[in-house]
Image (cartoon, rainbow, N blue to C red):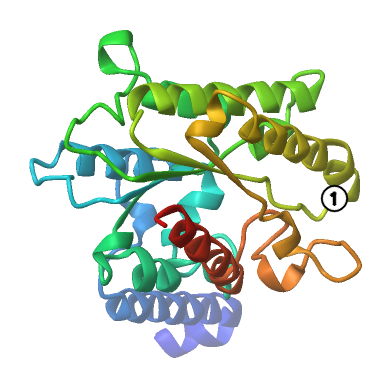
Amino acid sequence: MSSIIGARHPLRVWTMVLSLLAASIASAAMAQTPEPFASTRPTARIEYWQQRLNEIEARLSDPSSLAPIRLVFLGDSITDFWTMAENPWFPGTTGGRAVWTGTFGGADSAYLALNMGISGDRTEHVLQRILPRNEGGLGELDRPDLDPDVIVLLIGINNSWAAEDPAVSSIFEGVRAVVAAVHARKPRAVIVLQSLLPTNETDRNENVVKPVNAALAAFASASPQSAYVRYLDLYPTFLTPDGQQNRAFFMDAVHPDEDGYRAWRDRLVPFLDDLRQ
């Protein structure tokens, strides 16, 4: 009987065969999967900056003494990515983790550092993070045993996007407010105020970055902040001979790659050595 059905309905038979074959292939693929895809597991959403914030808060909540820390790095993603290995958004690019670990990871106790950079932060976000808890902030500089010799600050470039008008004045005033807030919380520390780095946009560099840097340099040299602020101009370090952003030092248009962090380290460490003399 089955042979008669097959002869009379060849399409039906082939449909059944293909269905069985597809089911077999699907079953084999599922059998080769060691565990369910991440896409199948209920997962709370957490952005990268939230993860970084949680990491910093966990470190600051740890009862282990913070007294050995000699340097605090404060800023946005450019500071944050000192501790990044492979960049998850740009495969094949690497941040500054190897440079950070070798220089600021504790091999030399004089350079033991805490990185408090958070991707995406603008000046107002850093201000909220270091505002004391009893004033409604996160109190990231509240712990009395966190008593660094130097606070290394780089902040402001994110304020050049969705910028207030005029952008240069807004960014400069934001950075100045951060400097004042840091000094109020840690008056013993020297603040190394670093220039903004060049972007790959000529107009942004000429109309915003360079004027902000000029204002920061003048601010750092003026009284009373000249007693506790030192200005480090990183801008030329990241340029080609023709004055453009050196793309060999960047993962993208804004963030240094491992070579960029190495070049930064090579400017920063001698600068820190001079401060100690």
Q: Position of residue 193 (x, y in %)?
A: 56, 41
Viewer-closest of 112 and 76: 112
Total labels drawn: 1
Residue lying furthest front: 277
Quarter holding the N terminus is bottom left
Q: Determine the image quadrant of residue 109.
A: bottom left
Residue at 66% x, 30% y: name it.
Answer: 219
Viewer-closest of 125 and 175: 175
Q: Determine the image quadrant of residue 116.
A: top left
Badge 1 amino acid: Glu
Residue lying furthest left: 63
Residue at 42% x, 27% y: name it.
Answer: 183
Viewer-closest of 66 and 8: 66
Q: Position of residue 75 (x, y in %)?
A: 50, 41
Quarter holding the C terminus is bottom left
Judge whether 171 appears above or below 76 on screen: above
Residue 253 as seen in the image, left or right of residue 273: right
Residue at 62% x, 57% y: name it.
Answer: 255
Q: Position of residue 157 (x, y in %)?
A: 67, 39
The residue to which callout 1 is attached is 201
| Mark 1 element type | loop
Viewer-closest of 97 and 31: 97
Residue at 66% x, 55% y: name it.
Answer: 234
Q: Is residue 135 visible?
A: yes
